[in-house]
Amino acid sequence: MVRALCATCKVERALIKRPKNYQKLCKVCFIKIFEDEVHHTITSSGLFRRGERIAIGASGGKDSTVLASLLKTLNDRHDYGLNLVLLSIDEGIKGYRDDSLDTVKRNALQYDMPLKIVGYDELYGWTMDQVVATIGKRGNCTYCGVFRRQALDRGAKMLGIQHVVTGHNADDVAETVMMNLLRGDLPRLSRGTSIVTGSQTSEVKRSKPLKYAYEKEIVLYAHHKKLDYFSTECLYSPEAFRGSARSLIKNLEKVRPSAILDIVRSGEDMARLVPGNTTDACHCTGADGPAEEEMTGCGSQNGRSSGSEMARMEAQLVQTGDPKNSGANEVEVYSSGSVVLPMRQSKGKRSAPKKAVAKQTLGKCERCGYMSSQAICKACMLLEDLNKNRPHIEI
Ligand SMILES: Nc1ncnc2c1ncn2[C@@H]1O[C@H](COP(=O)(O)OP(=O)(O)OP(=O)(O)O)[C@@H](O)[C@H]1O
């Protein structure tokens, strides 16, 4: 079968069928278009200012590795004038985070960026292995999410940096929109769709430059740019509700590729209906906001288990290789028939309709002194519970 010509340059043979819109592109044009689109997101939302120091939340996974590589490329190409630093949180999960941190250490050399690693053990006196040994796997993602969110802020403060970027992508945002839609929680939905969280009053703002990038295109970009990233799921259990929202969206995407971006855009439109929300930038403090809790999940939420779609896609890419070299035909990196999504059954209780929540005001946690919208921050509340059980386990 003769491969079609690239829809953009019309010279090279198409190698990639874009998951986003089925456009057939050659490798060079795909990479250029993907980079241009992220550049557009950054400039149109005025994400950075010249001279700004940016901490890239680096987990070693595909999203944050692509983010680091892309920001370096765009910073050089468009002269953003940014000072980029890698910031990694070591949750203390042996056989998972220690391996992914090795990847980040290599990335630091590859991209010539300084790397700061901050551990849960030094911040909280607990590793996630110890937390799971105490509370079991159920609910451990809540601890990890709350601790990581604060750890990223604290790591940034240690570096004297006020802006953290994370590798959250369009699929992540669509999942958050869907979850909050299903819960009937519009205020939380509104916070989850913002490209920037944290305001002038909060000490560290967070943003998602890959907000409009499809996860599948991130995998393709990483593959074709031959990026060095870590691809194993967390050893501890994923969050069931997010998994169900994800399956729902992936099934929609099969019949309507634009579904992911449509959900993101609908989320943005609905966010404008929330009283007090006038711009895309989130008005919550970002320190303790529930939407942030959801957006700072763990890699396992994205289901990279061997049976998952992303794992299949990665395996397929590795197997097929680059058709230019292997002589194979055009790579269709996805196919609606070939992907079987893991359906996780959620036994979650039906939650009562929620009232609109008032805007949060930033203060300081009475215990740790860290920024919080409540008297005692969530991390301290969780630590209190954990510490009650401390005598029962060996640390
Ligand atoms: N341990 C960590 N250290 C620093 N940043 C992290 C860490 N874990 C997650 N993040 C940040 O949060 C983002 C979303 O993380 P999450 O694990 O939910 O998604 P992911 O799709 O698996 O991301 P990635 O592919 O980058 O691991 C990551 O892209 C990264 O920027």
Image (cartoon, grey):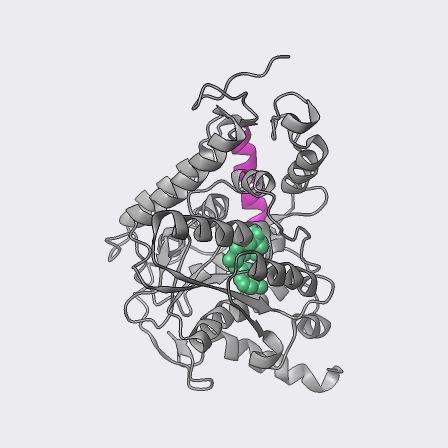
Q: Quadrant of the C terminus?
A: bottom right
Q: Is residue 155 above or below residue 49?
A: below
Residue stretch rendered in magenta on the structure: 241-254
Is residue 247 in the magenta section? yes
305 vs 264, left or right, is: right
| Residue 62 position within the rendered picture, expressed as x and y whole percent measured from the top left | 58, 49
Residue 9 at x, y = what percent?
A: 44, 23
Work out whether 303 lies above or below 293. Answer: above
Looking at this view, name the residue that lies furthest to the right: 394
Examine the structure image and report whether residue 325 is included in the region drawn in magenta. Answer: no
**Residue 19 vertical position relative to residue 170 in the rendered view, above or below:** above
Quadrant containing the N terminus is top right
Q: As rendered, which of 138 and 42 lies closer to the eye?
A: 42
Return the residue nearer the eye: 251 or 200: 200
Q: Measuring 48% from the left and 19% from the top, which residue is drawn there?
A: 11
Residue 350 seen anywhere in this rendered image of the structure:
no
Question: Residue 156 lies in what quarter of the image?
Answer: bottom left
Residue at figure coordinates x 44%, y 52% from the top left: 71
On the image, the x and y values in percent for residue 59 come to 58, 60
Determine the main secondary structure of the stretch shown in magenta: helix
**Quadrant of picture, ligand 1:** bottom right
Q: Residue at x 46, y 28 (%)?
A: 21
Q: Residue at x 63, y 41 (%)?
A: 310
Q: Image quarter for residue 223?
A: top right
Is residue 52 rendered to the left or right of residue 132? left
Q: Where residue 95 appears, x then y in whole percent? A: 74, 63
Front-most of 130 and 391? 130
